[in-house]
Image (cartoon, helix red, strand yellow):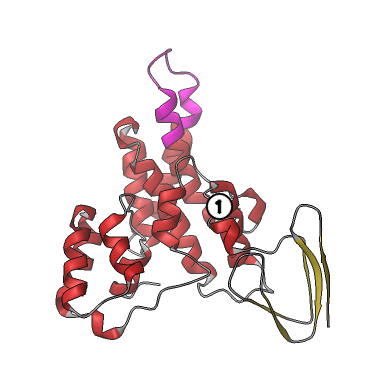
Amino acid sequence: MFRGHFCRSGTLRSIWHGRERKRKPLGGAPVTVTGTRHRFRYLPSEGDWLSGEPGAMMRCLVTLATHRGIAFHQSRRAVVRKLRLLWCGCARARWCHLPDEGRRAIEVVERFADGRAAARAFREARRAVAEWLRGARRFPPGSATPEAAEAMRFAVTAGEVHARLSDRYAVAAPPGAIGFLQDLFGNPFRPVEVAPAWRTATVVGLARAIYAERAFDLMPVLCDALQDAGCTNEDVLSHCRDRTDHARGCWLLDALIGTE
């Protein structure tokens, strides 16, 4: 049995009883809720994701990924990886302001997110950035710019995603994150299925090269290769043609490569 009501703000306050129920949230696709009893003070909706507000998008995403009563198409581990890469992408957008310690840390965190760096190197990179931020308070005036400190804090957050996700209200959205959120997660309410026929040797090889070299300027070339493979999905093709904010963890590249 379902009991619930919409409060003045439009959010859904509810209690579910029973093994499984489907409820269509405001403006979104059905979200599957499982379990015997789940209390929702906030139920994510597609409207929140499409709002263009980084805070609302992050809250929506983290709630989908962490609430045990919601069946989400991505595992918590996959979301942690993508959030690490999200913060790394935001830090790379400020690459010219990053000191050497921050650049090394971002590269280590990216490798760690993809399972190509040891935990020890990951911890050392986090420690180096934290020490830089502590020491920045003692730097002579003008030697550490606010942009450098902000980018270094992005590197710290990329290393702490696994801990912050345990408290979903502690995960904030970085400034300018809208494009990266859309690039890494697409629309979580309407995930796009990549047909096996599209994953030709040319397409997969090109996707791997773009990911490894961060050669996102080749995304239009990937669009042509997908069309040659028979892809007519406009969401996929427009993602290659029209998006400018790309980062490692891009949902399309992950799907083509086979990375969760």
Is residue 191 in view from this perspective? yes
Q: Note whether 158 is above or below 236 in the view shown.
A: above
For the N terminus, give its image quadrant. Answer: bottom right
Left or right, residue 2 beside residue 211: right
Which residue matches tag 1? 51
Residue 33 rendering spot, x and y as whole percentages: 69, 77
Q: Quadrant of residue 76?
A: bottom right
For the C terminus, give its image quadrant. Answer: bottom left
Residue located at (43% from left, 31% from top): 132
Q: Note whether 139 is above or below 190 in the view shown.
A: above
**Badge 1 element:** loop
Residue 91 rendering spot, x and y as whole percentages: 38, 41
Residue 189 rendering spot, x and y as whole percentages: 53, 69
Viewer-closest of 212 and 135: 212
Read off the magenta span. 133-151
Hey, which residue is sitting farthest top in the picture?
A: 141
